[in-house]
Amino acid sequence: MTTSPHNVLVVAAHPDDELLGCGGTIARHAGEGARVDILIVAEGATSRDAERDAGRRDAELASLRQAAQAAAKTLGARPPRMLGFPDNRLDGVALLDIVKAIEAVVADTAPGIVYTHHAGDLNIDHRIVAQATQTACRPLPGAGVRRVYAFETLSSTEWSDPGARPTFAANHFVEITAQLETKLAALRYYTTEMKAFPHPRSADAVRALAALRGSTCGVPAAEAFTVVRQVVS
């Protein structure tokens, strides 16, 4: 596929991270006519057991896949690709294997814009996906990825120790005033992941963060990002 500056790829560690981090931005890109692909690296459920047993969590994993598909459709994105790496155990997988899997999707989708996790998140999978995505999208001569943005993920980014890892510093904002309700509608498909307020992974907290980020840049609602790389030709 020929790279297009309008093709967007979102690389998320777990089902629901894509929405928490940039669901409104996905909907905005799609509404403006962009092709939006979503890649979810880990399966999102087996870390709840002492030992990984995907068969034991088969029904839950199937439910997460269905939720991811329904959420993507709600936002106007293409059906998500799910790699199925072990949940919260990416530190036990060779980084090169994750990089190569992401590289294959980058080559197939030819994005000009990539969104992924912040490298300072508390969650180990988020940090590894951030590193692997940046490696897969490294700016080699002729590379098509021109913009890479890191998003914040409620219940991970804000829980990280600022003395141990880089702190999320918002310096790129996307207004999602018109897309906020669509983002919340998509999140409702993740019935096993969303919680009641005051948990940060709740509809009220998502709405509050959108209002906070919006007030930072002078609009009613926004999503915030850190610029990893932005090339202007």
Image (spheres, rainbow, N blue to C red):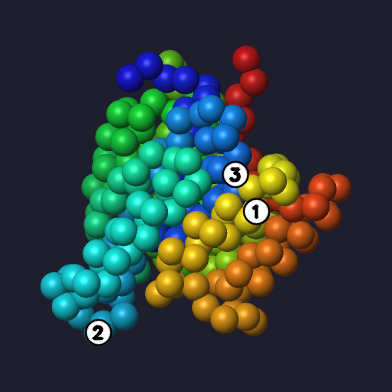
Q: Please, is residue 198 above or below residue 25 in the view? A: below
Label 1 and label 3: CA atoms lie apart by: 9 Å
Q: Is residue 23 above or below residue 59?
A: above
Q: How far apart are marks 3 and 2 (CA)?
A: 36 Å
Label drawn at residue 50? 2
Q: Which of marks 1 and 2 is nearer the N terminus?
A: 2
The image shows residue 27 at horizontal and vertical percentages of 56, 43
Q: Is mark 3 on a helix, strand or loop?
A: helix
The reply to whether the C-beta atoms of the residues labelled 1 and 3 are less than 8 Å apart is no
Q: What element carries label 1?
A: helix
Instruction: Report which residue position mark 3 lands on.
Output: 25
Camera-nearest residue between 151 and 134: 151
Residue in view at x 60 percent, y 24 percent: 231
In the rendered image, is residue 91 in sight? no
The circle drawn on residue 180 is: 1
> Where does the image place residue 152, in percent across and percent down from the top left?
59, 57
Q: Are marks 3 and 2 in contact (CB under 8 Å)?
A: no
Q: Do the residues labelled 1 and 2 touch (CB within 8 Å)?
A: no
